[in-house]
Image (cartoon, rainbow, N blue to C red):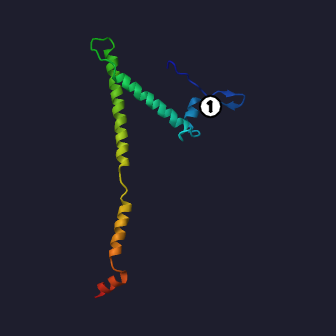
Amino acid sequence: MTGIEQKTSVPMAGKHVNSDADTALTPGPPDAGGKSALASRLETISSKAVEKLDEIMGLPLDPDHPAFAPVLRAQTAAANTALATQTKVDETALRRQQVDRLPELLKLAEEVRARLPPWLELEKLRNK
């Protein structure tokens, strides 16, 4: 790939030097914002990716231009990526909307118990 160096693990005098892959998978200490270094990097890369998708989607599409087919393929891929990601985001948001009704139900049960007569009186009424 152009512009990207490949770093590998190289033993040096009995020492192990971490590759980028080793460090990328290690969460590491939190940064100033409380996130791990990996989370911060991923957020930065994601932001750049969204900007690049926007740039690709904004390219002019002229059927007479020699690069028409590659630009169309790039825009189609960008649109598919954006839609797939938005679908996942929406799905996650819908899952978060699930409401925990247990506290409400417990409160309702307590209110019903408070209105009921004591158990001994219920037994007397049942035995009559």
| Along the viewing direction, whichever of 2 and 35 lies nearer the viewer | 35
Q: Percent from the top left, x then y, of residue 51?
A: 41, 26
Q: Quadrant of residue 8?
A: top right
- Which residue, as the protein is rendered here, is positioned at the far front? 32
Helix, strand or loop under label 1 = loop
Left or right: 62 in relation to 29: left
Q: Percent from the top left, x then y, of residue 86?
A: 35, 36
Q: Residue at x 35, y 51 (%)?
A: 98
Q: Quadrant of residue 64?
A: top left
Q: Which residue is mark 1?
A: 18
| Along the viewing direction, whichever of 20 and 37 lies nearer the viewer | 37
Left or right: 36 in relation to 66: right
Q: Residues within 10 Å of mark 1 (few under 14, many from 20)?
A: some
- Which residue, as the protein is rendered here, is positioned at the far right? 13
Q: How many marks?
A: 1
Up-down relation of residue 9 to residue 111 (above or below) = above
Q: Residue at x 35, y 59 (%)?
A: 101
Q: Percent from the top left, x then y, of residue 80?
A: 33, 30
Up-down relation of residue 79 to residue 107 (above or below) = above
Q: Quadrant of residue 93?
A: top left
Q: In which quadrant of the rendered image does the C terminus lie?
A: bottom left
Q: Residue at x 33, y 77 (%)?
A: 116
Q: Residue at x 35, y 43 (%)?
A: 91
Q: Percent from the top left, x then y, of residue 37?
A: 55, 36
| Along the viewing direction, whichever of 68 and 115 lies nearer the viewer | 115
Up-down relation of residue 13 to residue 126 (above or below) = above
Up-down relation of residue 32 to residue 53 (above or below) = below
Residue type pointed to by label 1: Asn
